[in-house]
Each structure stands twice: as structure tokens, then as C-alpha cells.
Image: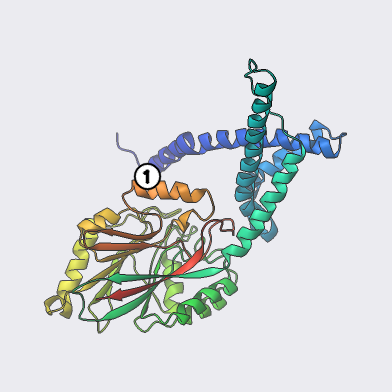
Amino acid sequence: MDLDDREILWYKAAMLWLFRIIPVLFLYTGMVIYTGFRFFAFGRFLRPSLKALIFWPLYGILAYHFVFLALFRLDRIKLLRLAGMYWLPFFVYLFSLILLLDLISCVLSQIRKKRRNPLQQNCTVRIMPAGAGAALVLTLIVLLYGSIHAQDIRTVRYELSIPGKTGMESFRIILVSDLHIGPTVGKAWTARIVDLINDASPDMVCIPGDIFESGLEGMVDQEEIAAELRRINAPLGVYACPGNHDTDRRTRSTGAIARFLAQTGIIFLQDEVAHLPGTGIFVAGRKDPRPIGLQDPRLSMEEFAASIDGTIRDSEIGNGPDKPLVILLDHQPLELGQAAEAGIDLVLCGHTHRGQFFPADFITRLMFRGYGGTNYGLWRKNNTQAVVTSGAGVWGPPVRIGTNSEIAVLDLWF
């Protein structure tokens, strides 16, 4: 029996809830209860008259406030939106520190028992109520550091040797991804990114996706942002491809974003190829495989590689003595192996944020290695090289812990 599009969407939504959302909610609820008991003890330590009937409802509202923000669209209020974004890293670090203190207490308790009576092997977890308070203070310090550090945009450099290409001697590309321009990354943050780009004197700038946080929604200073993006100084142009956040959720398209970028001079490539005038360089930009709120299939790597080859053959470079250089912008580093098999010279990606904050960096590292690629840095296979950047902006909580906001300077030597 054939299913229509609506039935397919319902089926996908049911599978998402059954295998992803519900298990995560169960795990989160267990963490909330565990942490709650520790803080109730801390509350009784500070105020012995504290009642459970007062503590637990208030704590429950705090723990699940992000649900109310989403249901009633309270995230439109800036202060509440910031509180919702900070909650994830706050709770992760708070829970981890309390758990660590409990484990330390458990080990020390076991050591003491063995010294007193070797026959006693049961471990009694005894943690001082003030330990929850210490965990809270440490968590706030870590988040304060992460908030300041996220806005410190670094410049990283790569030197890539690409023999026998284009007839040029050298070429400089600025790779800048995941700006997430929107409620958090506004005019001032964008201006710092543009200043760093211009200070590096690039020949070309590449933006492999997630230029915006959620389409153009939430960007209150559109004219100022457009003016900042127009300041990018790259003689051979600025090229971008869409990321999973670069969709207009109301129209379920990328049309509004494409029109906005056209006003800034940024060339927006969606399964398209562009030739840099006067060079043997071709830039190809892929659609994202999983755009949020949008069903927009993209060409397979084989189909897109054939399209690139056709564009090269139809150009004057195709019959010239110099071999062209193909640069592929692909937001998510999911198909680096396929790009190598297709003979792409250089692949530029973002998306991973390198995890953005510890310990998510370990998760993204394992995840993208599982796809045969990398979550950060330089990757090589056959004659293909790829660079994955951690991004110049932030998604969700405006913090970076264990990773950097960055732009990447790529010096290509032929």
C-alpha cells in the first residue's frame, strides 16, 4: 500500500518520538530526580524548615521550563530565551559535578569501612549537603568562562599543497561557517567576524552553511547585518551553501535567504557550480541533507560530480592546458569519502561546532569518524583534502568550553 506525504511525515514523527525523544526524556528525568534530591538536602541544610511540597513543584518548573517556552512561544522574550539556552550546559555540568562528588564520597566511605572492618563491603554514599552548593558555584564559574570565551574568535591557519592545478602559484581562502546570525549572534558579533576576514586579506571567502540561526526569523537588525556582510573584501567573491538551519520555516523554502544574500553580494550555491573569473577554480555548493523544517532532496555525490564535470567541459578551462581546481562546499562532513571517490580536490565543511562545549566534542568526534570523516581539522584521502571548521558563531547556548569560535585561513600552494 502506497503512503501519501502526510502519512510518511506522521510515520517519521512517530519513529522520532519512539526511538529518540522518549528515551532521552526518560534519561533526563532520571538525572533531574537525582540532582533534585541532592539540592533538596542542600536546601534543608540552609533552611531546615524547607518543605518538600514547596521545593519539588518549583524545582520541576525550573527543570522543565524549556517545555513551557516552546509550547507558549515564550522564547520570544529575550531573557527567557537566554535562560532556556543556558539551561542545557548548566544542568549537564551541575549533574556531572554532583555525580563526581558522590563517587568521591563513595570511594572514601569504602576506604574508611575497609580500614575499620574488612568484612563490610557495602558502599554507603554520604555527601555533605554543602557539596551541591559547591557544584552550583563551580558550574556558574564554568558557564561565565564559556560565555566570554565564545566571543573570542580565533584565527587558525592551514597550508595545503595542491600540485598541478590552475596555473596559479598560490591562493588564499577564508573558511568561515556556522555564523548562526539571529537572536544571539547580532551586528556586533558579525562585525568582529568580518573584521577578522578582511584582516587576513583573502582572495575568496567560503561559507559552508548555517549562516542564520533559523532563517531570517529573530534577526531584528537585518539592514545592519546586510551592511556588515557587504563589507567583506574578497576580490574573487564570497560563496556560500545552505546549512540545516538556513530555511524559512514559514514558507518552507530558502527563497528569502537567497534574496537577502543576493543583496550582500554573497553567491548562494544550492547544488550549483560557479567559475571564478580569470582562474581555473570552480566552486560547487551542495544543498544540506537534513534541512530543518524543509523537504528538499539534493543531488547525490555522483550526480553532483557529473554536474561539476559538465560545467568544466563547457568552460574555456575544460580545453586548456591547466587542470582545474574544484572546491566543494558541503555543510555537514558526512560524505568526505564519496567526495574523494568523485575526485573532488578540496572539501570545506562546518556544522559540527567541534561539539561546542565539553564533553559534546567527544560525541561529535566519534559520530563523524563513524561516517568516515572528521569532526574538525584537516582530513585527507587519495588526492582529496578537506577542512572542517568549528564555526565562528554558536548554536543554542552562547558558550564554548574546550572549543573555539574561529575563522580558518587556507593558503593553497600549487
Q: Residues within 10 Å of mark 1 (few under 14, many from 20)?
A: few
Q: Measuring from the top left, give residue 115's x and y in whole percent.
A: 67, 23
Q: Measuring from the top left, give residue 164's x and y in whole percent.
A: 18, 74
Q: Measuring from the top left, give residue 344's x and y in whole percent.
A: 24, 64
| Left or right of residue 104: residue 4 | left
Tell me the residue that label 1 is attached to: 5
Question: Is 33 drawn above or below residue 120 in the view shown?
Answer: below
Which residue is pictured at 38% across the width and 41% down the height? Answer: 8
Which quadrant holds the C terminus?
bottom left
Residue type, mark 1 in image: Asp
Which residue is pictured at 63% across the width and 41% down the height? Answer: 95
| Left or right of residue 37: residue 204 | left
- Which image quarter: residue 4? top left
Which residue is pictured at 49% across the width and 77% down the height? Answer: 196
Question: Is 282 drawn above or below residue 118 in the view shown?
Answer: below
Which residue is pictured at 61% across the width and 42% down the height? Answer: 96
